[in-house]
Image: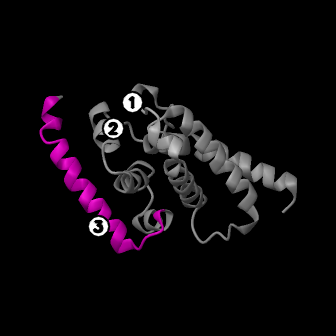
Amino acid sequence: MTDTERAAALERMMNAYGDGIKRFCALQLRDCFQAEDAAQDTFIKAWKALDTFRNDCSEKTWLMKIAVHVCRDYQRTGWFRHMERRFTPDELPERAADAPALDGEVTRAVRALPARLRMAVLLRYYQGLPLRETAEALGVSCATAKRMLKKANGILSQDLKGWENDE
């Protein structure tokens, strides 16, 4: 693949999936500024690995898998553990037209989930990845991904009990 073809492929992926990846990173890292850095790092890693992409999964799944690893790397740093990470749903990057709109209460409940469960929920329900691709992006089996989603759904149903009646 020539550099021109790689640049065109990366630009197409950035246009198609950039906002979704940035929102995923923001919800995962709980910091909009770090989310921008993480999204850039995701696309830099994708650029470097573009020749190794074998089309075993969709481009979106491949990019989300990279974003999951980038977010995990950010969360492992000592600096990340000691910084204040507070933001409101209004501070999230603009969502794509086809992305589901989330109520502020739902967003807060999802953000309160433990990191692994939050990643599973964001990939499966927010990014719309099929269960198999969610599991692949997380690096777990389908059965494990299903258990993670079931546990997250249980926590969310408790946290959001009566939420739909409040509107």
Instruction: Classify the position of the N terminus by image quarter.
Output: bottom right
Q: Is residue 107 above or below residue 114?
A: above
C-alpha span from label 1 to label 2: 7 Å
C-alpha span from label 2 to label 3: 21 Å
Q: Is residue 142 above or below residue 160?
A: below
| Occupied quadrant, residue 152 | bottom left
Measured from the top left, where is residue 72 in percent x and y? 50, 54
Task: Work out whether residue 16 or residue 79 is closer to the camera in this orientation and state it.
Answer: 79
Instruction: Specify few, some or many for label 2: CA neighbours under 10 Å numbering under 14, 14-19, or 20 or more.
Output: some
Q: Secondary structure at mark 1?
A: helix
Task: Work out whether residue 3 or residue 36 is closer to the camera in this orientation and state it.
Answer: 36
Instruction: Classify the position of the C terminus by image quarter.
Output: top left
Any mark on residue 107, and which?
A: 2
Q: Earlier in the sequence, mark 1 or mark 2?
A: 1
Measured from the top left, where is residue 60 in percent x and y? 56, 56
Q: Which residue is mark 1?
A: 89
**Amino acid type shown at disc 3:** Arg
Instruction: Specify few, some or many for label 1: CA neighbours under 10 Å numbering under 14, 14-19, or 20 or more.
Output: some
Instruction: Specify few, some or many for label 3: CA neighbours under 10 Å numbering under 14, 14-19, or 20 or more.
Output: few
**Amino acid type shown at disc 2:** Thr
Q: Is residue 17 above or below residue 145?
A: above
Measured from the top left, where is residue 86 in percent x and y? 40, 30
Q: Earlier in the sequence, mark 2 or mark 3?
A: 2
Disc 1 to disc 2: CB gap under 8 Å: yes
Any mark on residue 147, and which?
A: 3
Disc 2 to disc 3: CB gap under 8 Å: no
Q: Which stretch is magenta?
A: 138-166
Q: Secondary structure at mark 3?
A: helix
Predominant secondary structure in magenta?
A: helix
